[in-house]
């Protein structure tokens, strides 16, 4: 009875007493742009060392997000220069870290194949898979790794997301 029109829009789906998780959508896009650049350049120049750099950056970002190289570049360069501004949105960071870990795994496998075997075609194919999936996420906003995470959570194989929003494809 005494509610104002804007109050309903400010309600969250999280239970009382539980903080709603947030992510910086521009940091995610910034990271994807770097992954696209590194994996694409590695393929074009046929430089497996760039695959290793991308694998390490994704692995660090997934395992220790606060120490991630893309986060550091974003905060130390892109934000101070005014190239980007934070865009914090309600979302669980765990699916994004899972997607980074999957990408890192593919790139580690790619690196091993490129440096230690004669299966360079398979190594470059794994690099290309990460390039394409990061490109899809960057351009249309569909995170395949997040999608897998949500479905594995529904099956009980991974923790469910920490808010009731579930998987939503937001587009760009």
Image: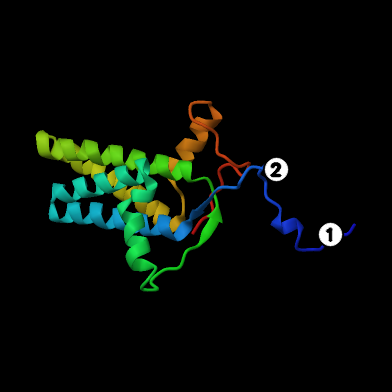
Q: Residues within 10 Å of mark 1 (few under 14, many from 20)?
A: few
In the image, taking residue 23 as reference, residue 56 lies left or right, namely: left
Residue 146 higher or lower than 36, as above or below: above
Q: Which residue is mark 2?
A: 16
Q: Which residue is mark 1?
A: 3
Question: Of 64 and 98, which appears nearest the observer?
Answer: 64
Image quarter of the N terminus: bottom right
Looking at the image, tell me whether mark 2 or mark 1 is earlier in sequence order.
Answer: 1
In the orientation shown, which residue stands out farthest toward the bottom? 82
Say which residue appears at 55% left-offset and 47% top-offset. 21
In the image, taking residue 60 as reference, residue 22 lies left or right, namely: right
Q: Residues within 10 Å of mark 2 (few under 14, many from 20)?
A: few
Coordinates of residue 26 in the picture (x, y in percent): 44, 60
Say which residue appears at 19% left-offset and 45% top-offset. 52
User: Between marks 2 and 1, how big is the CA–CA gap?
Assistant: 19 Å
Question: Circle 2 sits in a helix, a strand or a loop, which is it?
Answer: loop
In the orientation shown, which residue stands out farthest toward the right? 1
């Amino acid at each position: 009875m005494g509610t104002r029109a804007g109050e309903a829009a400010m309600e969250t789906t999280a239970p009382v007493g539980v903080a709603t998780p947030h992510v910086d959508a521009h940091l995610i896009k910034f990271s994807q742009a770097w992954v696209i650049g590194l994996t694409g350049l590695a393929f074009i120049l046929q430089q497996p060392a760039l695959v290793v750099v991308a694998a390490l950056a994704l692995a660090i970002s997934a395992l220790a997000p606060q120490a991630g190289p893309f986060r550091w570049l974003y905060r130390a360069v892109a934000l101070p220069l005014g190239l980007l501004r934070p865009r914090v949105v309600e979302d669980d960071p765990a699916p994004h870290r899972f997607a980074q870990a999957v990408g890192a795994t593919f790139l580690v496998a790619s690196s091993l194949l490129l440096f230690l075997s004669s299966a360079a075609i398979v190594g470059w194919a794994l690099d290309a898979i990460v390039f394409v999936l990061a490109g899809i996420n960057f351009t249309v906003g569909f995170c395949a790794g997040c999608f897998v995470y949500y479905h594995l959570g529904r099956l009980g194989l991974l923790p469910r997301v920490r808010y009731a929003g579930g998987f939503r494809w937001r587009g760009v």
